[in-house]
Image (cartoon, rainbow, N blue to C red):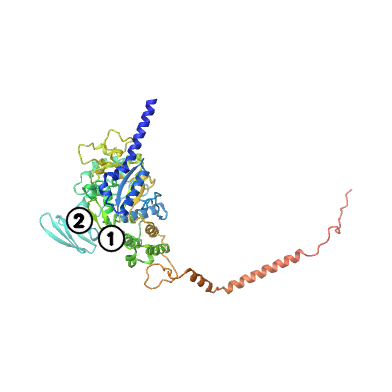
Amino acid sequence: MALLALWIIVTSFASVLCAEIGPYLEIQRHKEAVEKLDQEDSGILDGIVAVEKQHMEQVVLYHALPFYLYILMWIWNGVVDEKALKWQTEDLKTPYPVAKSPLSMRVFEGKNRFPSFSAPDPRVCKDSVTGFAEVRDQRDRVGKIMSTGTTQVGVNFQNGESEDFSLQPDGCFELIYTGLEAQGKYVEALSEAELTKQHVDNSRSFSEYLERIGVWNDTKNTPDHIAGVRQRIISVNLNVFGYWRTGWTDSSWDIFRKGLTLHAFGLGGRVPFLEDIFSNLQASTDTQKTVEKQLDFMTCIIGNRESTADCDSKFDESLWSCESEDQLVQLKKSSPKAEKCHKIITGTSDNDQCGTDVLLQLILSRDLANELVYVSVEGGKPGWENASEAFSESYEYVKVWCSAPTTFHHDKLKNHEAGDSKQGRVLLRSDAFHNGRLVTFAGHSSLFKDELMTSLSSLGEDVRRTLLGRFEACERPDTTAPGTTMAPEKDPSTTAAEDESKKKKTPVKFDVGVFRVVAILLLAVGAILFAYHRWQRRPRQPQEDRRVIEMPERA
């Protein structure tokens, strides 16, 4: 009995020790990168470490995404939950707020267990031109796009020929992406009905099914970019800095800090997630155009980080509520002068571009991580770069005790060097990411400041209402001066005493008709009360003078 008690104490201590080491090691192991961070990034890192400490007994993973996608996920969550958007933060007292607003990362149809997806459109169109992508023409010549223009693209074919293709009236070129065309064979196999038939339920069964249908060995596509796969899994780093020494694409922190994606796409652009939202809601053409304009204006504000000065030309009062207009006025007053950014990406290279992305911490219980998470290589395939390491161990991600025999599990990888070079994939199942919300998020960004996010939450709420067909534009008295683009502002030179003086000088006006009706009613009530008073004081016969009439008794 004593030995059993001792064993419990030792294993408990070891488990706590393994959990406690991580957050400190993560900073110490990357000291050469951390010591060069500017004040802004150091503050954000403080928030990341605080979340790690708060969730030591759980699994915390990292995923970087563009700010516009974060906003869309926030708006879509409000649509799904039928709740107004509200800026929410963790009470961690860190230099930068840590966002805890709920997100919906994908579109789920009805009671489906996995996100929906559409068959890919393989046409090369104006809004989907990708340089150096492999294409074929109508004569089945295969080549690569080598030059792009507004109305023309140039292709170099494998047979040595080259040709320029002009934009057709339908907005596309007479070219087909060979990779997207090849994805068509997976559409039926990855449908919800087929996944249910094949008993796909967790990350292991999903990955093994992809192996059987040939996805992991696809040579024309990056496996986790294939339609039906891309919507169902997301890539994560096990540790915040990832494998930054090999390049910024292997580090969630560096992807988050690079901040390039905002300029490659816009909130109003036809990004796949927005397309999925429109399709799910069967949004009308007018609704789609309105939403795109609203999101385009939000993109401008995000791109300027905190200033709205360059966005006046995009402002359209018919797109926003009075509350949003008021928020924009306040934001405009509080916007600081934009300063040049100086960001450290890998600890060795500098970047003068302001980071505008979001770094998410996904927080899961250990049991849930065992079901949804697996260790993977680039492209999503389970395993490690070293082929001698057991393939099946990819799924043994979480162990109770950090001294378990296998080398590759959470406590051996989390905030240890062994985990820096490993990626992970998370299966997006509805009970965790849609209905049950078993996964929670902690978000980090240099844009997460209360003034800006409060304004964006109001703008996002207008977008949510537009999607639901409940939006009403602001209607104010016509007091806005010609040429202004925001709600009318109060003259700052007006003092409180002057305001009070104006109130006193303003004559009080009465409606004569209403006054006359009130007077008549008062007179009527007075007459009734007078009559009642007179009736109460009428003469009455004394009690003792009243005669008692006795009835004669019957014999």
The percent position of residue 109, horizontal first and vertical second, equals 35, 50
Instruction: Give the label, 2 or 1, closer to the camera.
Output: 1
User: At x 68% / y 68%, what residue is drawn?
Assistant: 526
Pointer 2 or 1: first along the chain = 2
**Are the two marked residues, 2 and 1, in contact with CB atoms closer than 8 angstroms?**
no
For the residue marked with disc 2, what is the amino acid? Ile
What is the quadrant of residue 387 in the picture? top left
Please name whichever residue, 438 or 366, is drawn nearer the observer in this view of the structure. 366
Q: Which residue is mark 1?
A: 340
Q: Which residue is mark 2?
A: 176
Residue furthest out toward the right: 555
What is the quadrant of residue 15 in the picture? top left
Please name whichever residue, 84 or 244, is drawn nearer the observer in this view of the structure. 244
**Quadrant in which the N terminus is drawn:** top left
The percent position of residue 501, horizontal first and vertical second, equals 51, 72
For the residue marked with disc 1, what is the amino acid? Lys
Residue furthest out toward the left: 160
The percent position of residue 357, horizontal first and vertical second, equals 30, 54
Label 2, label 1: how far apart the Cα atoms are: 42 Å
**Label 1 Cα neighbours within 10 Å, binned few <14 / some 14-19 / many ≥20:** few
Q: With respect to residue 228, does 285 lie above or below?
A: below
Residue 373 in view (yes/no) = yes
User: At x 32% / y 65%, what residue is drawn?
Assistant: 310
Helix, strand or loop at label 1? It is loop
Q: For this view, does 425 lie left or right of residue 178?
A: right
Q: With respect to residue 554, does 456 lie above or below?
A: below
Residue 425 in view (yes/no) = no
The percent position of residue 43, horizontal first and vertical second, equals 33, 52
Please name whichever residue, 213 or 129, is drawn nearer the observer in this view of the structure. 129
What is the quadrant of residue 491 in the picture? bottom left
Q: Which mark is residue 129?
A: none
Helix, strand or loop at label 2? It is strand
